[in-house]
Image (cartoon, rainbow, N blue to C red):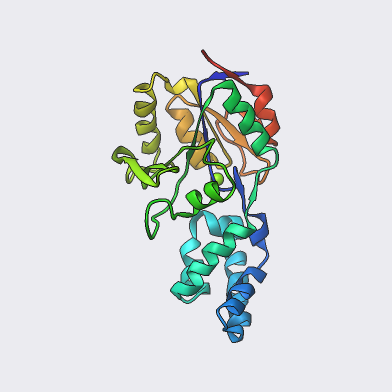
Amino acid sequence: MLEVKWVGFDYGQCIMEPGGLRNPLVIGDICKELGRPELIADRIYRYHQLNEQYGGYSRIKEGHRDEIYGYVLDDDPAAQELFTKKEQQYLDMGEGLVDALDWLQEQGFVLEVVSEMKKTLGAVGSDIVSRFLKGRGLTKYFPVIISPQGKLDTINDVQIDDRYVGKTKEGGDIYDVLAEDLRSRGIEPEEGVMVGDKPATDINPAHARGFKTIQYKGFIDLGPSDADLVINHFSELKEVLRKKD
Ligand SMILES: [Mg+2]
């Protein structure tokens, strides 16, 4: 049992599951909608190549997203925009997530998303994480996203804390700022728990800074980590977390 006040959730392969995007037909759909069916075969072939090179769509998405835009979609802005839209339709939520979030909110835990969101184009709030949270009605649980782009207010689409800008999960410095931020709100790092799938970004650097950590393996098992606990389904959060007064 972990007694905490704050719960930070990773985005990719945690609250969001990219299972539907394993299917390369999404690339075919895009070409059709753009009125360029002659590009389908080539682009699907390139998508397959990336999949093989990196070992699956999940891994492309983690660090090689640019190559979908550049290599597969020929840096065509219309195709990129359509991919971002389609992608939203193909994304799933982790099983049992909403029920767990309802419970966590009822208990009075502070909930925030901590995402390694890469550089985004366009206005604050148009990034993929914000779009996902809004599209699935999750902003009522997650009023902010903490990311290397800053701390984003998901309701008003504004960046509200510059200290986070340029800080990363992998580098760990985002958790230094987070610790400072939470302390100023009366929460010590050990009163916070980070939930995520990836040891190198969600678990080990947070653990090293005194946060409690839970490795979520419901979508993918990325191997051993320093996590205090491992869960395979979000419903387990109700059994392992208790709200600290
Ligand atoms: Mg992740």
Quadrant (top left/top right/bottom left/bottom right) for the N terminus: top right
Q: Is residue 228 visible?
A: no
Q: Left of 120 or right of it: where is 81?
A: right
Q: In which quarter of the image is residue 230?
A: top right
Q: Left of 112 or right of it: where is 172?
A: left
For this orientation, the residue located farthest to the bottom is: 38
Q: Residue at x 43, y 23 (%)?
A: 189
Measuring from the top left, give residue 108's x and y in whole percent: 54, 22
Q: Is residue 78 visible?
A: yes
Q: Which residue is drawn at 46% across and 64% down?
A: 66
For this orientation, the residue located farthest to the front is: 156
Count of residue discs: 0
Q: Residue at x 64, y 61 (%)?
A: 21
Measuring from the top left, give residue 187's x and y in whole percent: 42, 20
Does 28 appear above or below 100? below
For this orientation, the residue located farthest to the left is: 162
Q: Quadrant of residue 20?
A: bottom right
User: Which one is nearer the viewer's eye here, 142 or 2?
Assistant: 142
Measuring from the top left, give residue 120's x and y in whole percent: 40, 57
Q: Which quadrant contains ligand 1?
A: top right
Measuring from the top left, give residue 16's x and y in whole percent: 60, 47
User: Which one is nearer the viewer's eye here, 186 or 70?
Assistant: 186
Does 68 appear above or below 196? below
For this orientation, the residue located farthest to the top is: 245
Does 153 appear above or below 40? above
Q: Quadrant of residue 238?
A: top right
